C-alpha cells in the first residue's frame, strides 16, 4: 500500500523522506519556531512536525504526580495563530507541515488547517477514542509504535485494516536517547513482512548510524527530533539533532539508500567484465589438470571452464595448455 503526503506518493522503494520533529523545540516563540523551520529546510528535511494539544484535555491537572508534566506542556502549548504561521513558513519553503494531535480539539484544529497527514504518538497507539477521531478525518496516518506490546500493534493494525486507513508504520523505541543495543532495527523487516504498509523509523538514538541502517532494512520515513541549538532551554533540545547533524543525517541516509539495492542476488556487468582475470579455465600441466587464470573460456568457447571437469576425459591424451572441447565430427 502506497502512502500519500499531499501530492507526494511514498512507496516501499522511495528515497528517504526525512521528518524534522520540532515538537516543543519552538519554545513557544514565533521567531524561534520559524527559524527552526528554515534551518530544517536547509538541513535536508522534507517535512516539519509539531505537537498540537490543549494541555487540560490530555493531562489530569489535579494529579500531583504529573503536575511537572502538565506545567511543561502548558508552557509550550501552541494556539491557532502559531499553527498558521508555522504552516505558512513551512509551505512557503516547500516543506510538508503536519503535527501530532494529543486530544480531540487538536484533531479539529489540524483538520481546519487541512494538514496532509496526521501523526499518532507512540503512547496513543492504544488510545481508541483518539484513533477513532483521527480515522474519521479520512487522512493518511503515520503511527509510531514505541513501548507498544506486539499484540497492541497487531490490534491497531487490525483496526486500520478494517477501517481501510492509509498508514505508514514507524518502528520506534521510547527511550531518550535509545542505547544502540536496544534500537532493534530488525523490527523494520518484521513490519515489512507482516503488513503491506510503507514502513519508517522514529529514531531516538544519537547520531546517524541507526537511521542509515534502517534505510538499508527498508525504512522510508525517518523522523528525528530537531532543534536550532541543543543547548537551548527546553525539555527536548538535548535529545534533538542540530542543523549540522541533521544535514549529516540527510547525506548518510541518501548514501544508505543508494547502497540498499534490490532484493535478491544481483550481478552487475562491471563484475562479469572481470571474469577473464578473476575466474579460471582448465589447463593441462604435465600429468595434472589444473584450474588456472586467466579464464580463457570467456573469450574462446571451446576452452573448458573450471566447473567442467567431467568433460576432460583422459588427461594423458591432452596437449599441454588450455583444455579444449574436441569439436563434434559430423
Image (cartoon, rainbow, N blue to C red):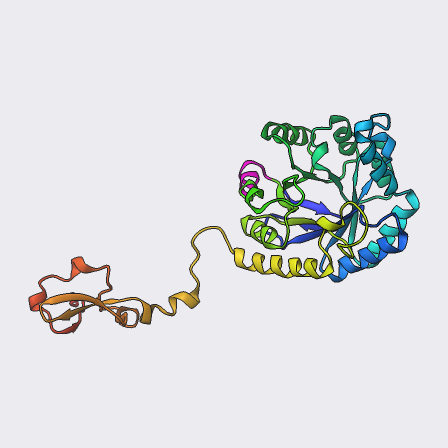
Q: What residue is at 57 percent from the left and 47 percent from the top? A: 180
Q: Position of residue 98 (x, y in %)?
A: 79, 46
Magenta span contains residue 108: no
Q: What residue is at 68 percent from the left and 33 percent from the top? A: 164
Magenta span contains residue 190: yes
Q: From this view, report whether residue 34 is shown above or below residue 71.
A: below
Residue 161: image quadrant is top right
Q: From this view, report whether residue 211 is shown above or below residue 56.
A: below
Magenta part, dominant SS: helix
* Most foreground residue, 9 or 215: 215
Viewed as shown, does residue 184 lie left or right of 85?
left
Specify whether residue 312 is in view. Answer: yes
Q: How many marks?
A: 0
Q: From this view, report whether residue 249 is shown above or below residue 297.
A: above
Q: Position of residue 123 (x, y in %)?
A: 71, 33
* Most foreground residue, 233 or 188: 233
Q: Position of residue 274 (x, y in %)?
A: 37, 69
- Give the residues drawn in magenta, as a range: 189-196
Specify whether residue 111 is in view. Answer: no
Q: Position of residue 302 (x, y in %)?
A: 22, 69
The N terminus: image quadrant:
top right
Residue 105: image quadrant is top right
Amino acid at each position: 500500500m502506497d502512502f500519500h503526503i499531499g501530492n507526494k506518493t511514498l512507496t516501499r522503494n522511495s528515497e528517504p523522506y526525512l521528518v524534522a520533529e520540532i515538537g516543543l523545540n519552538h519554545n513557544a516563540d514565533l521567531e524561534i519556531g520559524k527559524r527552526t523551520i528554515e534551518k530544517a529546510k536547509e538541513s535536508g528535511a522534507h517535512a516539519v512536525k509539531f505537537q498540537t494539544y490543549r494541555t487540560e484535555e490530555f493531562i489530569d491537572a489535579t494529579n500531583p504526580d504529573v503536575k511537572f508534566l502538565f506545567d511543561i506542556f502548558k508552557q509550550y502549548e501552541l494556539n491557532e495563530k502559531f499553527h498558521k504561521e508555522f504552516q505558512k513558513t513551512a509551505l512557503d519553503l516547500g516543506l510538508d507541515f503536519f503535527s501530532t494531535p494529543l486530544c480531540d480539539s487538536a484533531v479539529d484544529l489540524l483538520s481546519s488547517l487541512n494538514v496532509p497527514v496526521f501523526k499518532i504518538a507512540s503512547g496513543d497507539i492504544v488510545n481508541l477514542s483518539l484513533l477513532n477521531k483521527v480515522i474519521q478525518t479520512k487522512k493518511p496516518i503515520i503511527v509510531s509504535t514505541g513501548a507498544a506490546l506486539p499484540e497492541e500493534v497487531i490490534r491497531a493494525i487490525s483496526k486500520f485494516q478494517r477501517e481501510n486507513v492509509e498508514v505508514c508504520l514507524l518502528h520506534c523505541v521510547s527511550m531518550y536517547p535509545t542505547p544502540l543495543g536496544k534500537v532493534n532495527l530488525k523490527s523494520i523487516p518484521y513490519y515489512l513482512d507482516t503488513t503491506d504498509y510503507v514502513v519508517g523509523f522514529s529514531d531516538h538514538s544519537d547520531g546517524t548510524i541507526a537511521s542509515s541502517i534502517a534505510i538499508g532494512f527498508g525504512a522510508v520515513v525517518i523522523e528525528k527530533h530537531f532543534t536550532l541549538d541543543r543547548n537551548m532551554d527546553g525539555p527536548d533540545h538535548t535529545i534533538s539533532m542540530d542543523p549540522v547533524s541533521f544535514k549529516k543525517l540527510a547525506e548518510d541516509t541518501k548514501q544508505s539508500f543508494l547502497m540498499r539495492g534490490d532484493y535478491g542476488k544481483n550481478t552487475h556487468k562491471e563484475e562479469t567484465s572481470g571474469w577473464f582475470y578473476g575466474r579460471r579455465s582448465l589447463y593441462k600441466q604435465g600429468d595434472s589438470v589444473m584450474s588456472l587464470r586467466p579464464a580463457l573460456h570467456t573469450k574462446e568457447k571451446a576452452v573448458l571452464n573450471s566447473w567442467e571437469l567431467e568433460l576432460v576425459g583422459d588427461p594423458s591424451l591432452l596437449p599441454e595448455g588450455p583444455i579444449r572441447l574436441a569439436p563434434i565430427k559430423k
